[in-house]
Amino acid sequence: MTLHDAAWPDMFDSLQGAYAELAESQAELERRAAEIDEARELFEQVIDSMSEALFLLDSRGRIVRVNAAATALVATADDELLGRPLEEVWDEPRIPKTPWELLEAAPDGALADIDVEVRRQRKLPVPTSVSCALVRSKTGRIAGLIVVARDITERKQTEETVTLLSDASRALAESLDYEATLTSVADVAVPRLADWCIVYALERDGSIRRAIVAHADPSDAPLAAAISSGSTVDPDARDGVPKVIRSGSTELHPEVSPTVLAADVRERAEIQPLLEQVGPVSWMCVPLVARTQTLGAISFVTAASGRRYDDVDLAKAEELARRAAVALDNARLYELERGIAETLQRSLLPQRLPDIPGISVAARYLPARPQAVGGDWYDVFDLPDGNVGLVMGDVAGHGVSAAAVMGRLRNSLRAYAMEGHSPALVAERLNALTYEDEMATLAYAIFDPTNWTLRFVNAAHPPPLVIGPDGSTGYLEGGSPPLASMLTPLYSEWTVSLEPGSTVLLYTDGLVEVRGELIDDGLARLEEAARSTAGAPLEEMLEDVLARVLPGPGAADDVALLAMRASPLDPDRFQLRLDAIPSVLSRTRHALRNWLATAGADEAEVEDILVACGEACANAVEHAYGPSGGEFSVEGWLRDGEIVITVRDQGRWRPPRGLDRGRGTGLMHSLMDDVSIDHDASGTTVVMKRRLQADAPI
Amino acid sequence: MAVLSILSEGDVPVVQIAGDVDMANAMNISAELQALTPNSAAGLVVDLSETSYLDSRGVHLILDLGARLATHGQRLAVVVPDDSHVRRILVLTHVDEQVALYASAADAVEGVRSG
């Protein structure tokens, strides 16, 4: 609008126009003011409805504007805040109090995500995230500072829950041992979720065992022990843990008394004072359920921390229990499987080692823990021809499946061996019986006590060790591919002569293999250990070898050891104790034949004495034969060129029946120079003598 | 442990016993030998030339078998090499007085046939 130097009417017109314009402008201004008011009101509504707390400070750091969330955060009324510096109402050193402080901390004028805790009287600290920004005027002048604070309790809780549960998963995955898993559960819960954590196991007989009592304060240990040892859970109690286990539903008591906690305890009067000492504040109990089966329950109790459980805590506890139950279920199944595998394997190891004169045998089997049962097996048996079979094998893998393969191989090996097949042929047949995924190594040796030779096949097994009577040692060289080789391998066998008194040691790789070490080091260690204990009796030797070779108490892998020592037969003395069963007769003849040859009897004399002795032994078996069984002994002496055989049993003498029964006694008299048969209440003793033609032993 | 082998069948079966004969297996061998002799047969030849051990239980087996076969009008012959220990046992127990002993299976079969 302009005023011109013009004529009045023009001026009037102009004024009129100017007035109209003015009026128009006035209306415009009013409209704009209304708009601004509206906008301000909207702005006010918006900032007041914000869940974030907002503080607007002027250039000197005085509060000029706050919203409802801000007054709630600092618990101070709106009108008490305005005009005061922020630090008077919220003393948090990490938050800039003036624009200048902000610029010092952040030259670009903005700071985000300062995580602080806001403490209000008598309340738990509230995790809060703070952001600050400069406020500038249009001209760029610094006009003030905006501080926005956000309550991040929920985010923090989520984070904590995630950490708790991931820690739980990690701890629970560490062990497949049932009891160790129970301990892990409690360790994870204390102190993050509880001051006291008690894990209950529901036993097969329906009783409830308080398996673990964990506590945050180490000085509570005597109290925990007193509670553990001094009380038992009444599984039929109406309330408490039994109720949780029965119903499968949770219990949440934000406030709890010792009386409530003692509700399921049999020894209520004794336990009540102890629980008073605990000073429980809050309690929750969740069941341990896996695959619809209730395994137990976990109780979480707060005391000294004063913490009160709410639905969020209960959700955490439930999730923890869910994971724990899965881990416990796995541990239970694992232990079940291990139990089956162990039983299976034990049943496949020889119950007793054969008693062969001049040959001593000893064995050890150490299952690795906590790993699963392995496929190691050993076997020793006497063959129909009087030789001794020695077996050491190792099926790849663990558990029931390995034990089953092992059982098949063991029985097949025995069967082929009894058929009289050579070691290499036995290995070849076993290889044909195994499938590709049943890799196994095997050492099978046949010892012939008549000529001191050892014939063996080694299907990729660690080499047997021979320890001479003088302490010299040597590994038996010569190997073939493992069993279950994909190709049709050729199995070779080797024969070595043993010096009388030598020991043959078979073992599995668990003895000589240490992780991170060359197997040669293990072999050298074994050889050294065997050398240093060479003179010791066999059982002692095995103990010594194990003590020196195994790195620590817990072997990483299963270890099996089988040792056979062939002592030179004493030409003057023979001794054998036997079960009174018919199947021992042939074994007795083999042993006696070897001794008679050593004592210098010629072939005809050996045959005569064998039949005479066979008659006496058959009688002993017959006398003792019955449901209770029994034993008998055969002893032999060489005295001044005369063989004396004594067969003694503890059985009841039965007179010979008919002509046939007297025939055996008649044969004894015909074949020997002198026979005497004495029977009394304690049993029967037959003494037979035969003078040898050749004087000197061979 | 012993293994029975039927060396020939027909009117005079020949059965060889290889291995040891003792109280652990004598009863079973006896039953098996009887089963191997059909009623139509003239008799049975038991070849002990591969028998490594035989005591009074084996002696009883032979005598008992001979008696059983005789009730059917059948004859038993036993093959034992002249120098074998088994022959010594059979002679010491007077089996040779009741059962014919031969050094070869062919002679034994012929002996059973000719009666």
Image: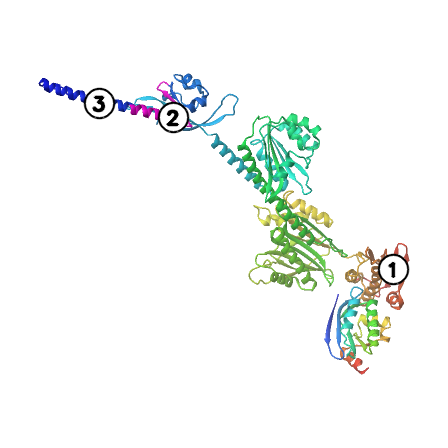
- Mark 2 Cα-neighbour bin, 10 Å: few <14, some 14–19, many ≥20: some
- The kind of residue on which mark 1 rests is Val
Q: Which chain carries label 3?
A: A
Identify which amino acid the numbered label 3 is placed on. Answer: Ser
The reply, left or right, for residue A148 in relation to residue A648 is left
Q: Distance between the residues labelled 2 and 1?
A: 116 Å
Per the image, the residue denoted by label 3 is A25
Chain of the residue that carries numbered disc 1 in the rendered image: A
Residue farthest along the left direction in this orientation: A7
- Say how many tags the image has: 3
Verify whether residue A182 appears in magenta.
Answer: no
Q: Is residue A50 magenta?
A: yes
Secondary structure under tag 1 reads strand
Q: Which mark is residue B1?
A: none
Distance between the alpha carbons at the discs numbered 3 and 2: 32 Å
- Badge 1 or badge 3: first in the primary sequence: 3
Q: Where is residue B61 in the image (x, y as percent from the top left)?
A: 82, 70
Locate the N terminus of chain A by quadrant: top left
Span shown in magenta: A34-60
Q: Where is residue A151 in the image (x, y as percent from the top left)?
A: 45, 28
Q: Dot 3: within a 10 Å radius of its alpha carbon, few (fewer than 14), some, or many (20 or more) residues?
A: few
Cα distance between the residues tagged 1 and 3 = 146 Å
| Res. A47 mark | 2
Would residue A123 appear left or right of B78 to someone viewing this image? left
Q: Which mark is residue A686?
A: 1
Looking at the rendered image, the disc whose residue lies closer to the viewer, 2 or 1, is 2
Taking depth in this image into account, of A506 and A556 the one nearest to the observer is A556
Upstream in sequence: badge 3 or badge 2? 3
Mark 2 vs 1, N-terminal side: 2
